[in-house]
Image (cartoon, rainbow, N blue to C red):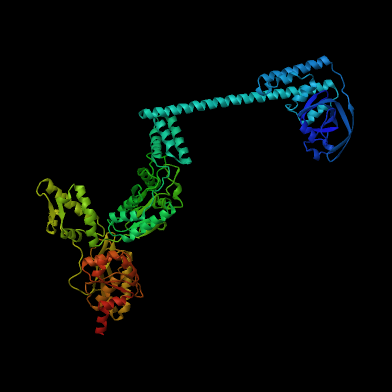
Amino acid sequence: MLYIPYYNVLSLPDVSCYFQVEYLNSLSDKPVSTGEKVLFLMLKNKKEAGGISAEDIYPVATRGVVESIDGEWALIHTTGRVNLDSISIEGNNFHMEMRSRPDIEDMDPEELKDHFQKMRAAILETSKENQGIMGARNYIMRWKNMNELVTFTSAMLQISNEEKYAILEEDSVAKRTALMEKAFYESLELYKVNNEAQTAQKESNEQLYREQAIRKQMNFLQKELDKLHPENMTDIQKFQQKIEESGMNEAAEAEAQKVLNRMKQEGQDSHEYGMLYDYLDFMTSLKWKKEEPAQIDLAEARRVLDQDHFGLKKTKDRIIQQLAVMALNKKQSGSILLLVGPPGTGKTSIGQSIAKALQRKYVRISLGGIRDEAEIRGHRRTYIGAMPGRIMDGMKRSGSTNPVMVLDEVDKLVRDYGGDPSSALLEVLDPEQNSTFTDHYMNVPYDLSDVLFVCTANTTDTIPEPLLNRMEVISFTGYSASEKFQIARRHLIPKAMQKAGIHDEELQITDEALQSVISDYTMEAGVRGLKNRLDTLCRVAAVKIVNKEEESVTVKKEDLRSFLDLAPIRHDRILEMKNPGIVTGLAWTQAGGEILFIETMFTKGTGKITVTGQLGDVMKESVQIAVSLVKAMFPDKEELFEKNDLHIHVPAGAVPKDGPSAGITLTTALASLVTDTAVDPEFAMTGEVSLRGVVMPIGGLPEKLMAAQRAGVRQVFIPEENVDDLKEVAEEVKKELNIIPVHYVKEVLEQVGILKAKKAAA
């Protein structure tokens, strides 16, 4: 007998079922043949044949016989139910003892037939609404009795194996029919409900798809109309199109869509419409899509820098290094450059040259006098008159994601109750943070990592330390007279003539006149004042040319007084006579180097020290150190300090003075006073001193030496530790000065003759 483990199909007696021969052969040790007896076993659990135990089989089964085999299919006819009295399984072999289980015929055949026909009619009615069942109508019409109907619909019955077995186990035909009807109609209704839900869902989806298709078609047609007649587009349509084309990041696009939806709801008559319009206009005007940087050509960059700027070798070399790092990394990298120097030395304009060399957009942002943090980060949109910060406004003006942005005058930021603008700049300039810079007005992150920032300042003293640490300082020294001459000839005069509309043959400025303008009519480290003087010469020449007074104007040295309408500027020159207690010092200012005279005098008194000339705290401390040092070096002169009042004066009292570089000058002046030894005015000096008499290093050496050369000084004492700074001093300045490095103040006193005079007196 062939045993078929039966999982989901309910098989009742007097039913003909088709099975694949291949499947039947896989369950038997020999090929299935006609007349072979078959036993259908209901399993409690779905298992493979080899894993079945006696406990897994229900005790009631169905028997049958193979009626025929037609190619791949075998027809099995069930002949009745059996009770399984005992079951034993060895491998794939089943050994069972069974006996027939007859039905209790307690139902009229006509009534049973009536129930069968109603159930078949119900499933045929359902098949009309379902294409899947509709193809099986002919098959359904061949069912002859209730058992066939239930057997072949058992796969769709929404009942468990236990419920199926309960039908098979029931002996009463009436009760079995009732169970079958209940399971059948419940499953049929459930099928109808599911089918209706699927149909409704399908209709809903079809409606949605149709609506979306129509909407897309409308949008397409609207865009085509907008292309033909852009003047007819509404603000909403314009901004929608701009948002889609902008390439914003997800956060920015979500915020823009949110504001756009609000703009739709508010309408043009709303008082907030203008604010919403301005926000969307700003957001869509920004460049969001990253740009591919142009190939960096270092030779071309060097050519551009040399063409636009004369001198500044150290600065140009550092910029070329920065560009080389960017070329290797294929992205913006390296330090933030801080160009520090006097006004008019070309700090701002060199940013334009960098942009030109990189083929990038250039934008300049002036930070001088900014006291409100919102100027950097922007105002929140909840405030009336809210605006974006200067950084994002500069990005909008540049129309690029990778411009060269010059932040001018970072040393003139002001900190007050409005916040600390320098702290806001930390995020802007920090490469670790600026990729997600968030302006308060925008309220979404923007990537500033591709921006090349170049900062400028006149001094680093007022820049907060955290901000200064993020930048690399490059000092701009002042220009020498010869450098100014070359700059004027190459750049300033051609630009001034072009600005005034004067042709080359209409104006000539002699070399003597130009040198006089540089030396006698300007007093600065840069060339801004020189530019203004040359502009004045061109304007005066333009008047003469327009009035036809002269066809060609030649400016000579003797013409400068009338052309410029001002007297030559008086520069401090060394004194013609030498007096004890007066020594020439060197000072650094934001406009360049200057000489200053330290004047000392004793008057009858009680040892009081008076300091005049608007000296700052640092210089007042230098006075105390100088007094103590001179007392220690000249103990026999201490009585002078006790019986006299000491007055120390630095001329130009209207000008505040401070800084750690006047100690050596003060000490020499006091030593000259107490020893009554005059110091030659051709000596000048700079450096701070300690109580041990050590001369300490100072800053601004190139500017100070240029001031010494201009003033007619011949010998200059500098701290020994500043010798390396001489590399930055122009050769023409070094040629005219005898620069003497010193380590102790006694070396200075010996060379100016003070200690020699002391020894001679002894």
In this image, 9 relative to 557: left or right?
Answer: right
Q: The N terminus is located in which quarter?
A: top right
Quadrant of residue 267 in the image? top left
Compared with residue 309, is residue 248 higher up or lower down, i.e. above or below? above
Q: Nearer the viewer, residue 20 or 734?
A: 20
Q: Is residue 541 above or below residue 227?
A: below
Q: Looking at the picture, how far across and down is residue 68, in whole percent?
A: 81, 26
Of residues 84 and 340, the one nearer the viewer is 84
Q: Is residue 93 left or right of residue 393?
A: right
Asked whether 38 or 119 is in front, the reply is 38
Residue 587 seen in render: no
Q: Is residue 302 visible?
A: yes
Task: Looking at this view, name the residue that lies furthest to the left.
Answer: 549
Residue at 17% of width from left, 49% of height from top?
A: 503
User: What is the number of callouts on the image?
Assistant: 0
User: At x 78% / y 31%, what residue is drawn?
Assistant: 21
* Residue 14 spot, x, y in % from top left: 83, 23
Q: Position of residue 55 (x, y in %)?
A: 84, 37
- Going by the image, does 379 lie left or right of 3? left
- Quadrant of the snapshot with the C terminus: bottom left
> Quick one: which residue is furthest to the top in this view?
110
- Residue 452 lies, in percent from the top left, at 38, 51
Q: Residue furthest front?
A: 71
Q: Residue at x 83, y 24 (%)?
A: 13
- Relative vertical location of residue 81 with respect to residue 45 in this rendering, above or below: above
Foreground of the two, 639 or 120: 120
